[in-house]
Amino acid sequence: MIVSLKWLREYVEIPLAVEELAHGLTMAGVEVEGVQERGGSLEGVITARVEAVGPHPGADRLSLCKVTDGREAFQVVCGAPNVRAGLVVPLALPGARLPSGVTLKEARIRGQLSKGMLCSQRELDLGEDASGIWILPSEAPLGIPLAEALDLEDVALELGVTPNRGDCLSMLGVAREVAAICRTRLNHPPLEVEEEGPPVETLSSVEIQDPQGCPRYAARVVEGVRIGPSPSWLARRLEAVGLRSINNIVDVTNFIMMEMGQPLHAFDYDRLREHRIVVRLAREGERFSTLDGVERALYDDTLMICDGAGPVAIAGVMGGLDSEITDGTTRVLIESACFNPRSIRRTGKKLGLRTESAFRFERSVDPEGTVRALDRAARLMREVGGGAVAQGRLDEYPGMAPRVEIPLRVDRTNRFLGTDLSQGEMSDLLESIELKVESVDHRRLRVTVPSFRPDLAREVDLMEEVARLAGYDRIPVTYPKGDVFAMPDDPHRRMREEIKDALQGFGYHELLTYSFISRKALDDLRLPPDDPRLKPVEILNPLSEEQAVMRTSLIPGLLQTLAYNFHRQNENPRLFELSKAFLPRCDESKDAKPAGGGKVEARGRETRDKGRANGDFLSPLAPRPSPHVFGFLPDERYFLVGAASGRRRAQTLYARDEEVDYTDVKGVVERLLDFFHPREVRFASEPLPPYMDPAAAACVLVQGENAGTLGRLHPKVAEGFDLKKEVWLFELDFEKLFAGRGEPPLFRSMARFPAVTRDLALVMDESVPVQDIVDFINEGKELFLRRIEVFDLYQSPRLGAGKKSVGYRLTYRAEDRSLTDEEINDIHANLTRKVMEAFNAVPR
């Protein structure tokens, strides 16, 4: 936004220097990005009169001109075709530096001395006309600087207006801010209109078919206008803010847009079919030729201004060729409307059109200001174009919005800002920008927000206004303070950290994988169709098909990361993840089936993965979107998964070259379970999830409840995830283990009496689980039995078909004495007999 300081002074008294004004505006939130003086580049260019014009003796197309500044005469060689005696023109004398950077000197042109140059508008960078010399008004005084004669001396302020301050995209809006800064009064331009024509209702009508896209549409009709050049004051005002003068009627609409921030459009009334206006949405595929001569295909959400037969303008963006103002226009319909900012922004983006009017509509214009701008335009058109203004105006306002009232607490404002302003000071500051302020009591104000400030909607917005108007330099420097206290201990978080530390001690590396995965990754786990994990929460706006649903298991991410490492020659990975899975909640209806089918929308993006949590393995970076849930909340549960593959020891200098097997992951799980102090832990072969290999896997039963699984990954699942090596993994339901955790063991003194061990080696059917015998012995609750361990498992054809040999080591101890061999032998023999009878086993 370019602001002419000379134009600005017409609305407000400015006692500040330019530098002080720029600083004040910037500190008030209206940043001044640049200050440029106008007219200074015309030094050495004066007004002069052409006294005589004669032919050049050495050139047919050049003339010898005698030019005077009222005191001295100069001979100038000129090639302009429109030069003639009696004209007042701009004369650049020797030493003048033109805007192009050229410095003039006396010169001989074809043998004739030229003591200057008669200039065109383009040569002085004051217009586009380069066809001849610039003919100035005949009453212009001679011999004075051109900038002074044309009143061109000015200062242009370039403002950086934020999107929420559409009110500052006008001279009056900036003047309002200046008046508040300088504590002066804002002078509004006159709006009274002399109406001489017929009633406007007899000439035209307005119909709004889309009140959401067009909350208000007003119009006036001016008859008998004469199209021609704009008066110099109007043209200079537009040029001062970077706009080109077109003709007197169009220039008025541009002038009002820059003055009041309300874009207007002038239609040739006689070219409007049926002389009426209809505001509607375009039809899909409808085509329309805009003022720039381009035929455009419209969309069904494009708001159009139409006459009785078809479109005449794209609402708020650009008018059409068929209704533009021409030299033959005599009657004008002036449009002043308010359009939905989102609609204009969407239309401009789709059609690739960026105009000054769309720029303002996108940032919201004042719906209450449409009529004021309309009256101002009608008054100026009558002034510069003649004609008669029709009586009354057309004003359709179906979307009238109530005024916003916001309470403002004085004490809270001072605490928020760190100031000590009185209620009266706050009231004066807010009234200085034309907010209506009423006192409720000695501690509260009620502020009515004008329609030109839609950005003020909350109490904190008013506090910001108070701060910037009072001056940020009045806000004292303070330091935040607060009570320091320790957060209460979170056992859940502490347990998670302890588990992670333990796994890192076992040589595992932590990873963080995507919270969003693909449906295919879940299908590759070979889950049954009724498994609730196959009903994940869907993402409404997925970044890709690979992130289409929220994960219901951590296994896919773990296996994908394993494949990522295998493909990059990390042959011996040890990985784990302790994080959330998002399970569908179960409907508490009679069927109690998983609800599933929820949807979430990704809003924002959390921090990326840790990547290489340790230098020994690679992990793809994964964005972690934070879901915003619409009508569905998944069951967020922590799970712990881990995997190992390759060699048991990467370096085998002092050890055998062994591969990871079942015992490695089982040992890790047994150690992890100790953190939860379970009363009973068993490992069973049923029921196993389908992604585990039943030949080398087990379920983890804690207090008889399934809390996880461990073992070898099923070969078909490994194939689906492109895993070329054998993978051993474990999966534990952290929430279930944490909820069922037991009390930590108390201190127990060391045994005073020695223990006695006996071995029990039995040959039994191959189908008998090893654990069943352990359970049978424990159920017998032998008085002195303290521990049972499996120390041998042997299979050989010599044992017989379908037979195996298992060796158990039993430890006996008494708390009050030393057991004798006779006692132990009797106890052990009796226990052996019971086991053999129960399992049809024989001693080996």
Image (tube, rainbow, N blue to C red):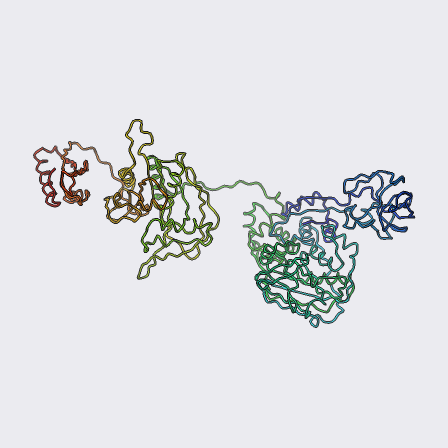
* Left or right relative to 647: residue 149: right
* Left or right relative to 164: residue 607: left
Q: Quadrant of the C terminus?
A: top left
Q: Position of residue 641 (x, y in %)?
A: 34, 43
Between residues 720 and 238, which one lies in front from this camera angle?
720
- Determine which quarter of the picture holds residue 783: top left
Relative vertical location of residue 101 with respect to residue 198 in this rendering, above or below: above
Relative vertical location of residue 747 with respect to residue 219 in this rendering, above or below: above
Between residues 555 and 481, which one lies in front from this camera angle?
555
Between residues 26 and 690, which one lies in front from this camera angle?
690
* Left or right relative to 88: residue 648: left
- Residue that protrudes farthest toward the bottom in the picture: 202
Q: Position of residue 751 (x, y in %)?
A: 18, 33
- Residue that protrudes farthest toward the top in the picture: 654
Relative vertical location of residue 761 with respect to residue 252 in this rendering, above or below: above
- Determine which quarter of the picture holds residue 439: bottom right
> Disc count in the image?
0
Q: Position of residue 801 (x, y in %)?
A: 15, 42
Is there any visible trace of residue 67 in the rendered image?
Answer: no
Between residues 405 and 681, which one lies in front from this camera angle?
681
Relative vertical location of residue 187 with respect to residue 569 in this rendering, above or below: below
Is there any visible trace of residue 468 in the rendered image?
Answer: yes
Q: Position of residue 255 (x, y in %)?
A: 72, 56
Residue at image x 33%, y 41%?
A: 642
